[in-house]
Image (spheres, grey):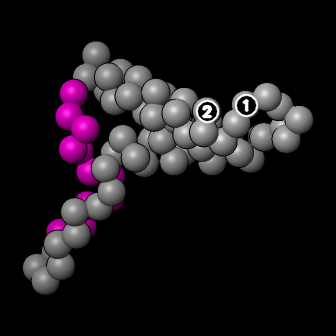
Amino acid sequence: MSNFEKAFPVTTDTVWQEGMDLRDYFAIQYVNGTISNFNFDSCMTFDEIAKYSYEMADAMMKARVA
């Protein structure tokens, strides 16, 4: 499992952009889904959401190579 895979790399004759880490992209998607359905009466803190987003991203990265 590589945490250095990139999401949305761009390579043309004149432009090369590395893109964001795929792990970060997965974590962002988890946060977007969680926050869009967030219940502010929940006992889940934003720090916990951030932590869980990377745990989910790590699981997704692992699943890609399984």
Q: Is residue 33 visible?
A: no
Name the residue: 84% across, 38% down.
Answer: 39
The circle drawn on residue 48 is: 2
Q: Position of residue 16 (x, y in %)?
A: 17, 72
Check residue 7 for magenta coloring.
yes
Instruction: Tell me the distance, in whole angstroms, between the alpha carbons under discs 1 and 2.
Output: 6 Å
The circle drawn on residue 44 is: 1
Location of residue 52 (image quadrant): top right
Residue closest to the far top = 66
> Magenta part of the protein: which range?
1-11
Between 64 and 27, the one lying in front of the other is 27
Amino acid at circle 1: Met
Left or right of 42 on screen, residue 8: left
* Residues tagged 1 and 2 counted as in contact (Cβ below 8 A): yes
Check residue 44 for magenta coloring.
no
Left or right of 10 on screen, residue 53: right
Q: Position of residue 29 (x, y in %)?
A: 54, 45
